[in-house]
Image (tube, rainbow, N blue to C red):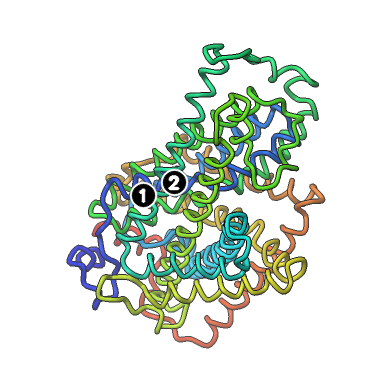
């Protein structure tokens, strides 16, 4: 079985190694949901929704909570699948695995370029005489080398990045609580900022619903924990643990921290108009803490580097799995002696370099087009995975019920409710002028991938495995 090769750490067999420990998977799970979208992007959401931004984060967190539970169920039942695309393949067939794999890879390649540009944008403030494009290059090269060395070097780097982000949020919540309770020097606003200046919903309840659409994408990437768990020494155990941690921490880190921001700072403070600074820094300034802006800028940079680091990891594992299934060029499957998919990592990095170049020469045209073309992709592959979960759950209940150690609640009703919810978000994005183009361009991206699959199916011989019912392959794999 594949898992046997992994346990022996044989890169010559073309299998990833099981070298990650519990602390790695735990921090990857926690760090994967905390990015620059929270530290910086939350300001724009607060300005558009008011204190009701808390509701926006609760709604988005709940949807991500349900999606992660569905993915977690599949990951625990078959923890050695190696990529979320394999759950789609097992449940719905090769077209779904091909589509999810390439959609996932495409989205995170674009995100990697965006994060590199954002990181350079912060560093240029400290190194004004160094061109931003060169700083982008340095960031990409350093984190590429980290990923190339070994999966453990990636995990160690992510462990410390995540530790800094988590410590920063806990620090913020602790000091915020002391301030709001009136235990801090000076006058405390208490909870008055939640209901003054127009009330809790100053721009209406619709604004809060629209805000939840924007917030949802800042929570993307939480499933990296299940991918990393497959490279741990106890895949099923850590996949279940990571899934539960991600779900509960979404509410703690996002909802609670945003609550403290809107309670400390009036919502109509122009967060979005403050360059680089995050709402966290502005809130800490209210407390009179010295060096708060500089410290938070370091945290934001850490969040960006953490996201870039994770992007390179995700894209390489997705491409590696596609290659193993014959959906990508076979030469990319080669592993180093340390069990690292070197060529798959470099392939994703190359597109990161291309994205940086495009941003330099065509920031308002080509690069913006690429960003928008991946804008709704996350919802597309989550939808496919949700349908796959429904089918795989029914199959496992009949044939291998003991493998369902982590279950989606109230099945199948909550699974169907999650699917309807995601379709509603897509409909809302079409209705909102600012996100409408993202849906249509993402649909074009999806269409191109489906056409590529049809071409691939037409001109390549199906393997013996392709004649097996997808859910049968999943159940067989779970027995290993």
Q: CA distance from mark 2 to mark 1?
A: 8 Å
Residue 159's disc is 1
Where's the C terminus, which quadrant?
bottom left
Horizontal placement of 429 versus 357: left or right? right
x, y percent for residue 77: 33, 51
Horizontal placement of 352 versus 154: left or right? right
Q: Callout 1: few (<14), some (14-19), or many (20+) C-alpha neighbours within 10 Å?
A: many
Asked whether residue 339 is in view, the answer is yes
Image quadrant where residue 198 sits: top right
Q: Is residue 185 above or below residue 404?
A: above
Tell me if label 2 and label 1 are in contact, CB under 8 Å: yes
Residue drawn at point x = 33 percent, y = 41 percent: 241
x, y percent for residue 124: 61, 59
Looking at this view, name the residue that lies furthest to the left: 8
Q: Is residue 196 above or below residue 479?
A: above
Q: Which secondary structure lies at badge 2?
A: helix
**Residue at which label 2 appears:** 31
Foreground of the two, 307 or 387: 307
Residue drawn at point x = 72 percent, y = 28 percent: 267
Counting every numbered tag in the picture gives 2
Where's the N terminus, which quadrant?
bottom left
x, y percent for residue 110: 59, 65
Looking at this view, name the residue that lies furthest to the front: 129
Residue drawn at point x = 33 percent, y = 54 percent: 156
Q: Which secondary structure lies at badge 1?
A: helix
Asked whether residue 386 is in view, the answer is no
Foreground of the two, 212 or 139: 139
Horizontal placement of 183 versus 474: left or right? right
């Amino acid at each position: 079985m594949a898992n046997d090769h992994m346990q022996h750490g044989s890169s010559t067999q073309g299998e990833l190694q099981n070298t990650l420990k519990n602390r790695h998977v735990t921090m990857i799970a926690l760090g994967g949901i905390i990015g620059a979208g929270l530290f910086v992007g939350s300001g724009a959401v607060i300005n558009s929704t008011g204190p009701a931004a808390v509701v926006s984060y609760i709604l988005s967190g709940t949807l991500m909570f349900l999606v992660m539970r569905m993915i977690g169920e599949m990951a625990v039942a078959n923890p050695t699948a190696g990529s979320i695309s394999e759950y789609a393949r097992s449940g719905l067939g090769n077209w779904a695995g091909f589509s999810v794999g390439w959609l996932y890879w495409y989205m995170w390649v674009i995100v990697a370029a965006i994060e590199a540009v954002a990181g350079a944008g912060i560093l240029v403030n400290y190194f004004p005489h160094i061109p931003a494009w060169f700083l982008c290059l340095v960031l990409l090269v350093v984190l590429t080398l980290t990923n190339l060395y070994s999966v453990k070097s990636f995990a160690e780097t992510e462990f410390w990045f995540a530790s800094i982000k988590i410590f920063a949020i806990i620090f913020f919540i602790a000091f915020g609580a002391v301030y709001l309770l009136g235990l801090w020097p000076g006058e405390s606003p208490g909870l008055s900022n939640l209901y003054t200046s127009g009330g809790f919903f100053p721009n209406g309840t619709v604004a809060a619903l629209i805000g939840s659409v924007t917030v949802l994408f800042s929570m993307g990437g939480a499933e990296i924990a299940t991918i990393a768990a497959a490279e741990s020494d106890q895949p099923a155990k850590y996949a279940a643990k990571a899934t539960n941690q991600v779900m509960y921490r979404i509410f703690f880190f996002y909802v609670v921290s945003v609550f403290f921001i809107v309670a400390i700072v009036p919502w109509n403070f122009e967060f979005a108009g403050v360059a680089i600074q995050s709402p966290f820094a502005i809130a800490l300034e209210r407390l009179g803490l010295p060096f708060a802006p500089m410290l938070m800028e370091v945290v934001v940079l850490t969040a960006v580097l953490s996201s870039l680091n994770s992007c390179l990891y995700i894209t390489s594992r997705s491409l590696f799995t596609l290659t193993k299934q014959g959906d990508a060029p076979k030469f990319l499957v080669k592993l180093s002696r340390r069990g690292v998919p070197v060529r798959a990592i470099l392939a994703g990095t190359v597109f990161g370099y291309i994205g940086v170049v495009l941003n330099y020469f065509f920031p308002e045209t080509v690069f913006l087009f690429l960003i928008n073309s991946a804008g709704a992709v996350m919802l597309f592959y989550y939808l496919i995975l949700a349908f796959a979960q429904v089918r795989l759950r029914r199959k496992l209940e009949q044939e291998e019920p003991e493998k369902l150690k982590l279950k989606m609640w109230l099945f199948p009703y909550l699974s169907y409710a999650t699917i309807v919810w995601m379709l509603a978000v897509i409909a809302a994005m079409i209705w909102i002028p600012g996100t409408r183009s993202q849906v249509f361009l993402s649909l074009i991206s999806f269409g191109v991938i489906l056409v590529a699959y049809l071409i691939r199916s037409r001109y390549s011989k199906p393997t013996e495995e392709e004649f097996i019912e997808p859910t049968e392959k999943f159940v067989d794999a779970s027995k290993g």
